[in-house]
Image (spheres, helix red, strand yellow):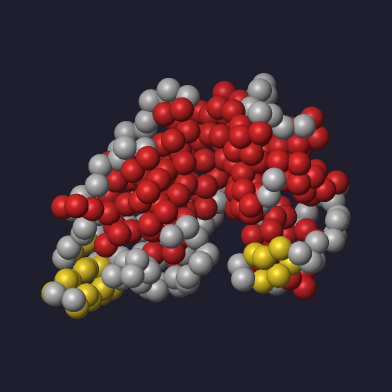
Amino acid sequence: MFCLLGSEVAWSAGTVWRDRSLGKKTLMELNACNWLWNTGPEWGTRLMEDWVASQRLPEGPGWHPYMTSQRIVNWIKWGLMAGGLSEVLRGSLAQQLRFLEPRLAFDECDHKLINNAKALLFAGLCLADPRASHWRARGLRLLARYLPRLVLSDGGYAGRSPMYHNALLLDLLDVVNLLRAFREPLPDQLEARVTAALRWSRALCHADSVPALFNDAALDVVPATSRLVAYGRRLGLPEEGSGGEIGSCWLPASGVGRLCAGQALLLADVGPPGPDQAA
């Protein structure tokens, strides 16, 4: 038994990955494997190999391209931490990448496309595979093309949702971390856009660090702003504001503002709605 998104999940080997009684969001989170870091090395490998054994065909909830991207990255990170992946898991990763590449989120053109690019970059730089250089190059092209479209000039996500903004921001921080670790040059504007995105995330938080629930945002779905800011600090990204504080500001490209007056704080969304495909 373990907990995902506030729901208890009873473990059932081989079948839990397709158990629709869990609900769509819990099932998606389960298949994305974002929970891996809460397991021990032996148990984590056992769970990943159980996933492989239950997925003879690339179909069902575990094969949504966004979940596939997240799982690819989580498994590769796990392998880097654990000193390698089993042959079973390496073979599955190759299958998942073959499945993902023709199904990138071009039709939605939202934060999921950057997540797709991140998966290709992790695969291209971390896996010993004949297609690694192709994955790396394609991931970089996607990033260069869509970063200016999805991260506005003031750092905000084009969908104008603090929740999806933080999901995108985590992906971009991971990309900066990955490229630096492999001594790869950062694409133009990447560091500047990530720095601006960190400021935007901080600006859209209340005094208790809880983000504004604008535009389909919800709590406890994506990493908290405080965690992302700490990640940015570890990467040495610059911060705006004296002593780490952020005051009143207007973010014109997003149409959102922050007004501080003593102990009072107003967060306002007065801009146009985000595009449907960026939700």
The x, y position of residue 169, in whole percent, is 41, 51
Give the image quarter of residue 257. Answer: bottom left
- Residue 117 pos. (x, y %): 52, 41
The residue closer to the viewer here, 114 or 175, is 175
Image coords of residue 45 (percent x, y): 75, 42
Q: Which quadrant holds the N terminus?
A: bottom right
Which residue occupies 16% across, 71% down? 260
Q: Is residue 82 above or below residue 241?
A: above
* Nearest the eye: 103 or 177: 177
| Above-or-below relation of 11 to 190 | below
Q: Is residue 226 left or right of residue 91?
A: left
Q: Is residue 235 left or right of residue 2?
A: left
Q: Which residue lies most toward the front here?
A: 40
Residue found 25% across the figure and 68% down from its top:
256
Residue at the (31%, 37%) spot, across then down: 236
Q: How many marks?
A: 0
> Residue reaching furthest left?
261
Nearer the observer, 172 or 276: 172
Vertical position of residue 217 compared to residue 39: above or below: below
- Res. 194 visible in picture: yes
Q: Is residue 278 visible?
A: no
Left or right, 174 with respect to 23, comes to left
The residue at the point 76 percent across, 46 percent down is 43
